[in-house]
Amino acid sequence: MKKIFFSLIVASMVILPQQVVAQGLKTSGSSAVDIVPAGWESIFKTGDLNKDGIADLVIIATPCKEENMTTRDDGYVYNFNQPILAIYWGEKNGNFKLFKQYDNVIPVRPDEFMSIDPSLEIAKNGSLRIILEYFASAGSWTQPTSTHVFSYRNGDFFLIGKDVVELERTTGKTVSTSENYLTHKRIVTTDRPNRKPTVKNTRLPKSALKPLGFNLDESDE
């Protein structure tokens, strides 16, 4: 009897991790719908990231764990779960195979007043653009949108550029900052209603390119 009980414990220790993994993104699949668990919020984009002539797949998926969700009186649901970023290489057979999963790159929605809406773009040259649009219903004068540009090189994705557009909702003033980490140039354009835009060019200090993996809210640190 003791041997049977011990065997059941060991079996449960083996099965449990497999069940946990099953609740996450699949490591391969034929499409984003096939890879992302049912009920998760997700966006995706396809394009050739590694320039091998085969379309690859990028997914941002947000789990639906109830302990990290809040329902408003009118029924609207706030999702405070940590979004997951995942990149899949396309294969000749039409399937996608996981290259890397990043669990802390996309920022979590901080509270009920601030929303962060991500979107994805893949350029013809293979660069990956992760766009974060921030909107505050209260407590903020500005409405920023940031675009982080990554390029696949030397076996990984590296940040090669960043654009930030900040709009002052009360004045209409817009400040656009564009940084290129390959040319080490920064361009700041300030645009005010009924005024000619001003442009300021500066040089960035040379430094090693940052690999994808950091939280995009902390890319300036």
Image (spheres, helix red, strand yellow):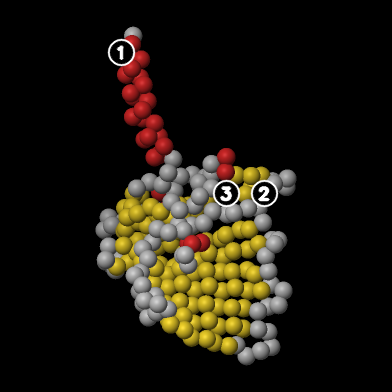
Q: Amino acid at mark 3?
A: Phe
Distance, label 1 to label 2, CA atoms, is 51 Å
Q: Find out whether the residues at labels 2 and 3 contact each other: C-beta distance under 8 Å.
A: no
- Residue 153, by quadrant, is bottom left
Q: Which residue is mark 3?
A: 80
**Mark closer to the observer (2, 3):** 3
Q: Residue 99 placed where, x, y %? A: 32, 55
**Which of 69/58 is in front?**
69
Q: Amino acid at mark 2?
A: Tyr
Q: Which residue is mark 2?
A: 76
| Up/down of 208 relative to 60, above or below | below
Task: Residue 3: give its label.
Answer: 1
Q: Is residue 67 left or right of residue 162?
A: right
Residue at (38% x, 52% y) in the render = 101
**Which of 191/89 is in front?**
191
For residue 176, say whether it is visible.
yes
**Mark closer to the observer (1, 2):** 1
Q: Is residue 59 left or right of residue 91?
A: right
Q: Residue 121 placed where, x, y %? A: 45, 67
Residue at (43% x, 55% y) in the render = 85
Q: First in sequence, mark 1 or 2: give its number.
A: 1
| Up/down of 85 relative to 65, above or below | below
Q: Find out whether the residues at labels 1 and 2 contact each other: C-beta distance under 8 Å.
A: no
Q: First in sequence, mark 1 or 3: give its number.
A: 1
Q: Residues within 10 Å of mark 1 (few under 14, many from 20)?
A: few
Say what secondary structure mark 2 lies in: loop
Task: Residue 220: give its label.
Answer: none
- Residue 176, by quadrant, is bottom right
For residue 48, say whether it is visible.
no
Q: Residue 28 placed where, x, y %? A: 34, 49
Q: Amino acid at mark 1?
A: Lys
